[in-house]
């Protein structure tokens, strides 16, 4: 009788299966992103001053955070789909978005008068941030979880959490074009809270649907 360790080794060595899972994951990302785009452009849309916002550093800085987060988390989700995952640079580079956000927040604290700190932190779109990002991210999360079921994650919870992180990055990329609050103080407060909702949902979904 084959042992669990031997089964894991056989599955990990099957490059055909790994390539097939990668194809499913890529399709899930594309479909999930398209779903977000359809909902966003039909229901939400760009902020009214999008053209002028494109010329401001604070607005563009949001995408320096959310776009790499989506790409790196998706890469980590790909790696987590195998029985013996090797995250390599995908896992290490995931630290870059939060580090950049922390540095941007320090710069904001240095250049903005302290009397405005709380105003910038609270902003005007906190509720939208906490509702729109999780709502938009639900579609990509479901698609990625379905694709991960084609693999054999050794840690279902972590694999699901990466799926939630990738979904939040996709959703936040679209939402950032609608959000009028560009201050890093706002971003570091509310975006991670919205992301945590999808990360937790992905973790629970992973435990429930990715066990094998």
Image: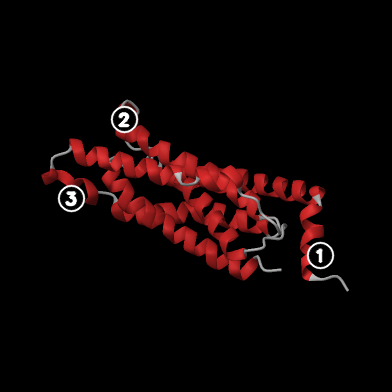
Displayed quadrant of residue 75: top right
Q: Could you tell me which residue is drawn at 66 percent across and 54 percent down?
A: 85
Above-or-below relation of 28 to 151: above
**Residue found at the far left of this picture:** 115
At mark 1, the secondary structure is helix
The answer to whether 119 appears left or right of 2 in the picture is left
Above-or-below relation of 158 to 44: below
Question: Which of disc 3 and disc 2 is earlier in sequence?
Answer: 2
Mark 2, mark 1: which one is toward the viewer? Answer: 1
x, y percent for residue 76:
59, 49
Question: Which of disc 3 and disc 1 is earlier in sequence?
Answer: 1
* Disc 1 and disc 3 in contact, CB within 8 angstroms: no
**Residue found at the far bottom of this picture:** 1
- Of 32 and 65, nearer the camera is 65
The answer to whether 30 appears left or right of 189 in the picture is right
Q: Badge 3 is on which residue? A: 118
Displayed quadrant of residue 145: bottom right
Q: Badge 1 is on which residue? A: 6
* Disc 2 and disc 1 in contact, CB within 8 angstroms: no
Question: Which of disc 1 and disc 2 is earlier in sequence?
Answer: 1
Q: Could you tell me which residue is drawn at 31 percent across and 56 percent down?
A: 127
């Amino acid at each position: 009788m084959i042992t669990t360790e031997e089964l894991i080794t056989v599955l990990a060595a099957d490059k055909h299966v790994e390539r097939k899972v990668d194809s499913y994951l890529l399709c899930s990302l594309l479909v999930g992103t398209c779903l977000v785009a359809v909902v966003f452009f039909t229901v939400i849309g760009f902020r009214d001053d999008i053209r002028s916002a494109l010329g401001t550093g604070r607005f563009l800085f949001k995408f320096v955070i959310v776009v790499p987060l989506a790409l790196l988390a998706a890469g980590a989700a790909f790696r987590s789909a195998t029985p013996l995952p090797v995250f390599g640079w995908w896992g290490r580079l995931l630290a870059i978005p939060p580090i950049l956000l922390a540095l941007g927040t320090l710069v904001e604290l240095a250049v903005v008068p302290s009397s405005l700190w709380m105003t910038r932190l609270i902003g005007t779109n906190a509720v939208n941030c906490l509702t729109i990002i999780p709502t938009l991210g639900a579609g990509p999360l479901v698609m990625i979880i379905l694709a991960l079921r084609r693999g054999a994650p050794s840690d279902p919870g972590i694999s699901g959490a990466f799926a939630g992180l990738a979904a939040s990055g996709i959703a936040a990329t679209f939402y950032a074009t609608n959000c009028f609050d560009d201050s890093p103080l706002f971003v570091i407060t509310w975006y991670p809270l919205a992301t945590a909702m999808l990360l937790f949902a992905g973790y629970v979904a992973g435990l429930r649907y990715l066990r094998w």
